[in-house]
Amino acid sequence: MTGFLSRRHFLVGAATAAILTQARVRQASASPSPLTFDELYGSFSALGLTFSDKVKALADQPVAMQGFMAPPLKAESNFFVLTEIPMALCPFCSTDADWPDNIVVVYLEKTQTFEQANALIEVRGRLEVGSWTDPETGFLSRLRIVDATFGRA
Amino acid sequence: MRALVAALTLSTCLISAAGATAIYPLDRATILASSPFDFKVEFDGVVKADDVTLTINGQPAKDVLGKDVSFVEKEDGVDASAVLLRGVTIATPGTYTVEAKAGDETKTVKWEVYGTPATPKAKNVIFFLGDGLSVANRTAARIMSKGMTEGKANGRLNMDDLDHMAFIGTSSTHSIATDSANTMSAYMTGHKSRVNALGVYADRTADSKDDPKVETIAEALRRTGKKAVGVVSTAEIEDATPAAVVAHTRKRADKADIVGMFYDVKPEVILGGGSAYFLGKDVPGSKRKDDKDYIQMFKDAGYTLATTKQELDTASGSNTGKILGLFHTGNMDVTLDRMFLKKGTVDKFPDQPGLVDMTEVALDQLSKNEDGFFLMVEGASIDKMAHPMDWERAEVDTIEFDKAVGVGMEFAKTHPDTLVVVTGDHTHGVSLIGTIDDDKPGNEMREKVGTYDDAGFPNYVDANGDGYPDSVDVSRRLAMFANNYPDYYETFRPKMDGPFEPAVKDANGNYVANEQYKNVPGAVLRVGNLPKNADTAVHAVDDVVLQATGPGAEEFKGYMEQSDVYKVLADAMALAPTEKQASAK
């Protein structure tokens, strides 16, 4: 297992940076709650899905999720898509709209080398719930782990 | 005219690269008389408006088309000029020679405008489209479903009894190879196009919604009469095949826009998956980027909504005349998972109807229309499972597709004024070569592949007589292989835990074998023969076999271009009733 280098770096920084709010330090220090793909949604219907009570309760809280890194949309990027199983996308439809429902978009605290898609990874960061469009890429996500780090699970 | 030509020869300041001028519709296009289409000329360089001459059969184009063209000096993102005329029609059948000139750029194309008999031969048309349906799919489905004894099939598929047939050439306008967008678009418009394009010719500008349009069959039916229209698929309803009935876009991935195109045409029956593109962006599961609620919009337009098989049964009994059935946010689960293994996403969407259920409801609803109907039914997952080489799932879906064909043929028996067409859109590089027998000696799976005399017959059992093998995981099963593939682990076994994902993308963007299958007993790494950017097996260029029965089916024969099939449908329904021929040369 590789360490969460950038997180450690963050904690060291947090100890000295006076501008960080008390709340943020408390959040980052808290042990992240494990979250699995099976726990994301409470119900499924063609009329839409509903987030699970656990996801709602963990909104804006630190979480840890295991999964696979989907093929990155571009090689150098500070975000990627975490999926339950290793996946391939058809070449004709790899727009963000074609991603499956059970994904979480991960925004990294800082750029890291991407892992092979075949490797199980663990992501830690703060869970964000609700639709948000990345102004830089136009990528629309509904579940995100932000300020995140990852390493081999 | 003569004066214009003289003026052109005097012009000296034109940029040109002879021969690259393009005219849409392309040379040898066949056009249904009176059907609207966009006329576009792309010059190779920047030209002056005054230097452009356009003639059709020697007459100024605007006299023939009834409107003047608009000139674009520099197209968006292109350092070249174009002329464009949207929504023109030609009413008189015949050969039309179109010539575009600007300076020393000249391009000539010929169009064939065709009419139809004055009287329809068929009141109803049911168009069954097995996505990717290849000959091997039919053979394997017949053996798996019916069995075989001493070299003779123990039963026949429904499609085996269709009495007219043709070989269909599926190639696209820019390549011998092809995909589900341009192929279905050729069937549904009568015009070939480029990979990924629906209801348009592919022009050179980046915008996917500005390409020169041609009329879809649903639009033609709206324009010419009162037939009801139905679109049924096990895929997302805005996926390429069902979309081709109504859509115009260079890019099949414009799925959110395609929902709007369905709304514009409003087929009376819409059944399939893909509700994610009907939901506003804030609804979890939505794949829209705006707040449009198409579910509500269709309801407001008088549609009865169904989201489960049970609701579909209820909707079937209602008299609203219009049904919107959306049973999954994405593609519906394949037959093997939905009916037997309960894998895939069946735990999340447990009450999805099958293709047979949807076909029955669609026919019941559409046949209430006294002016008849056009119904398109797609067995989508034959292709969706052939790509990842999940042959058992592809075959069980082929069997269900054939059962839906049976529903259509049964309807035609009591409604003999119905043309039934059964075809694929393109093929896959798949063949059935023998059997795989677990009881052959040794551990190496390849030694268990039986070929020639050693293949014998598989031992599938259908004890309950439902036409599906009770298990696909039998000890002597069909050996099917793709002739093209990415790197993957060949397991020689059915994928009982869920659909096969043969390859995954690595950090360099190359597809590598999915290690999830590495430890399956007997699995071997098969090094791909496709470029490393290929995620799965690809479409084949091989001809498709089309079969048909009923009034009009006699026009299917020999080899036909995919776009020629539209003329048979148009003839059957008399979409351009005119016997006159153009007097122009």
Image (tube, rainbow, N blue to C red):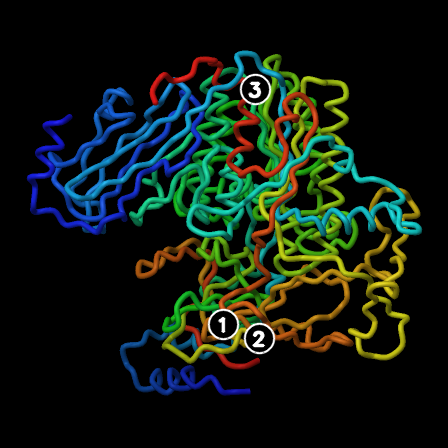
Mark 1 vs 2: CB contact within 8 A: no
To which quarter of the image does residue B229 belong?
top right
Q: Residue at x 61, y 75 (%)?
A: B527
Vertical position of residue B444 compared to residue B75: above or below: below
Numbered mark located on residue B573 in the image: 3
Instruction: Give the quadrant of the N terminus of chain B.
Output: top left
Tell me the amino acid under the disc marked 2: Asn
Is residue A63 visible in the rendered image? The answer is yes
Residue B36 placement, left or right of B562: left
Gap between marks 1 and 3 measured at Cα? 48 Å
Q: Are marks 1 and 3 on the same chain?
A: yes
Under mark 3, the amino acid is Met
- In the rendered structure, which disc, 1 or 3, sits on the residue that comes first in sequence? 1
Mark 1 or mark 2: which is in front? 1
In the rendered image, which residue does mark 2 sit on?
Answer: A118
Give left or right: position of B25 versus B573.
left
User: What residue do we see at 40% from left, 20% from top?
Assistant: B34
Residue B167, x across and y down, in percent: 62, 41
